[in-house]
Amino acid sequence: MVGKLITFEGPDGAGKTSALEAVVARLQKEVSQEIVVTREPGGNPISEQIRQIILDVKNTAMDDRTEALLYARLEDNILLKRFNRHLRPINS
């Protein structure tokens, strides 16, 4: 089975979630493959907790490097936890 990766990019409030919900609803009617939906940052319990820390406007004292490391950890967590079982080496 060959899968597809679709991403929605844009600033907060641009309508990414609404667009995602519409696309998922349509794909569910048209394809038989499993549809995996996640968000960044977030997508699983620990990532959602880190997301809350990053997006909390009260966290004004957070160093830029700390925020960057948290985002990097989230991306790593999403790849390892959500998509690893869906990925395969290109040569296989």
Image (cartoon, helix red, strand yellow):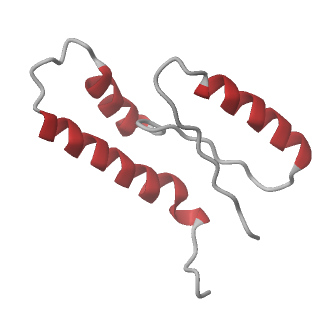
Against 78, residue 3 (above or below) is below
Q: Residue furthest right?
A: 30
Q: Residue at x 44, y 50 (%)?
A: 78
Against 67, residue 6 (above or below) is below
In this rendering, would 59 be left or right of 16? left
In this rendering, would 22 be left or right of 60? right
Image quarter where the C terminus lies is bottom right
Q: Name the quadrant containing residue 67.
A: top left
Q: Residue furthest top?
A: 58
Please provide percent x and percent y for residue 29: 90, 41
In the image, 57 versus 86, the foreground residue is 57
Q: Residue at x 10, y 32 (%)?
A: 63
Q: Residue at x 9, y 21 (%)?
A: 61
Please provide percent x and percent y for residue 43: 48, 38
Q: Residue at x 52, y 17 (%)?
A: 13
In this rendering, would 42 be left or right of 9? left
Against 12, residue 91 (above or below) is below
Please provide percent x and percent y for residue 64: 15, 35
Total tally of numbered discs in the picture? 0
Q: Name the quadrant containing residue 32.
A: bottom right
Please provide percent x and percent y for residue 70: 24, 41
Image quarter where the N terminus lies is bottom right
